[in-house]
Amino acid sequence: MLKSVWEFLGTYIPWVACNGSDGDNVNAHSITEGTDVKEQSDADEGQIVLMVVAPWKELQQKIVKAGDKDLDGQLDFEEFVHYLRDHEKKLRLVFRSLDKKNDGRIDVQEIMQSLRDLGVNISEQQAEKILKRMDKNGTMTIDWNEWRDYHLLHPADNIPEIILYWKHSTIFDVGENLLVPDEFTVEEKQTGMWWRHLVAGGGAGAVSRTCTAPLDRLKVIMQVHASRTNSMSMAGGFAQMLREGGYRSLWRGNGINVIKIAPESAIKFMAYEQIKRFIGSDQEILGIRERLVAGSLAGVIAQSSIYPMEVLKTRMALRKTGQYQGMLDCGKKIMLKEGMSAFYKGYVPNMLGIIPYAGIDLAVYETLKNAWLSRYATSSADPGVFVLLACGTISSTCGQLASYPLALVRTRMQAQASIEGAPQPTMNSLFKHIIQTEGAIGLYRGLAPNFMKVIPAVSISYVVYENIKRSLGVTSR
């Protein structure tokens, strides 16, 4: 019996030795030439002992760790059989997730698509090399038996799990527009977990935006009022806000900034799902290009729907003490004095800013993700909290940096009508004026407080997000 098991082992891994029940040591007939196999002759009768052969030490340790139930450092026959059965179930789930056509076979295109879902683009020739390693009968497709036989003694991480860990999540809320929404699995949609994630993300955004609201208001004031002549610094801006309205004035505009999270997230999510169907994707997880297109279009729809709230936020952040009694009073006075068109000031640069923000944010995130996967993902798909937060923070910051000039022009256009006697410039004329009078640096007024709020905003939103998820009964990864 054990010799037949040994023949099974020797077929798949060339670095195994086992101790037979008769005490005779049986060595692998397929050991790679030049490798060093350490014999172990003191094993208990009936045990299968995995021998260490460089460079497969890590793989051997993972198999033993996964199957060693009694923690004696070895696999007996019962433990080994249990490991195989458990691992086979996991392999079948992965096989089904890769089999996009549901025909019981995996081909080159399905391998390429699965890796694209992970953000890894490979050529057809590279995919063929991967497939040939598992294809025993030369059909250039892999059936279940070939998949199982190749992977059964390799504790590989499954692809959907890796995607789940690296989803671009709404926890990375820096108070700006998140333009690539979360993707939810079929199971999450059926069980209602998706709305719990959205609620947790909205609550986390509300808390993080409130905590960093003074920096956000300072950014808006510097975008509108700072210039080469007045040289408004961060300290000077804070002092001006405190002199004019006291500590409470630091949070002006935060109320509308928090309120708009719910409708924006809901519209964006619904639009994203509809756009996925429109572009003809029947996949659970979109590729990078599809995510960029669907996310950008969903962002345009959501921003168009709630844009008057963006104008209100800017006006409330810039208001003087006693100017408005609240959000409704502000909206009413803008409507009566300036008309409906005032609620869409700066609309064009805002929409134009969506493409560079979403594109660079997603591109940087995928680049950092691929770099981590290629270098460190040998033992686990889970990158850990700090890696995810770092990647999200860096990518969001790069996206903001690319779209910041458009955001500044948008804010100035939103604010111009509130300034007595101020002209009403177009987007192009405002760009030219800033370049001529202040130089390129004028397009980045307020960037310092904007960057200062990124790390605390991401950190706070992550902590709140995880706590709200637990309170709503959302299962962790």
Image (cartoon, rainbow, N blue to C red):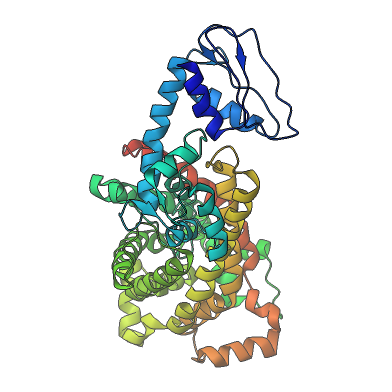
Q: Position of residue 407 (x, y in %)?
A: 53, 75
Q: Nearer the viewer, residue 118 or 423?
A: 118
Asked where in the image residue 279 lies, by quadrant, the reply is bottom left
**Can the viewer see residue 346?**
yes
Q: Nearer the viewer, residue 365 or 40?
A: 40
Q: Quadrant of the N terminus?
A: top left
**Can the viewer see residue 218?**
no
Q: Nearer the viewer, residue 199 or 7?
A: 7
Q: Answer above or below: position of 261 versus 197.
A: below
Q: Answer above or below: position of 319 versus 80.
A: below
Q: Answer above or below: position of 446 versus 154.
A: below
Asked where in the image residue 451 lies, by quadrant, the reply is bottom right
Asked where in the image residue 43 lies, by quadrant, the reply is top right
Q: How many marks?
A: 0
The residue under the point 43% across, 81% down is 347
Q: Position of residue 171 (x, y in %)?
A: 46, 51
Q: Answer above or below: position of 192 versus 174.
A: above
Quick one: which residue is furthest to the right in this view? 34
Q: Position of residue 15 (x, y in %)?
A: 63, 29
Q: Position of residue 212 (x, y in %)?
A: 53, 54
Q: Quadrant of the C terminus?
A: top left
Q: Is residue 159 left or right of residue 442?
A: left
The residue under the point 29% across, 64% down is 270
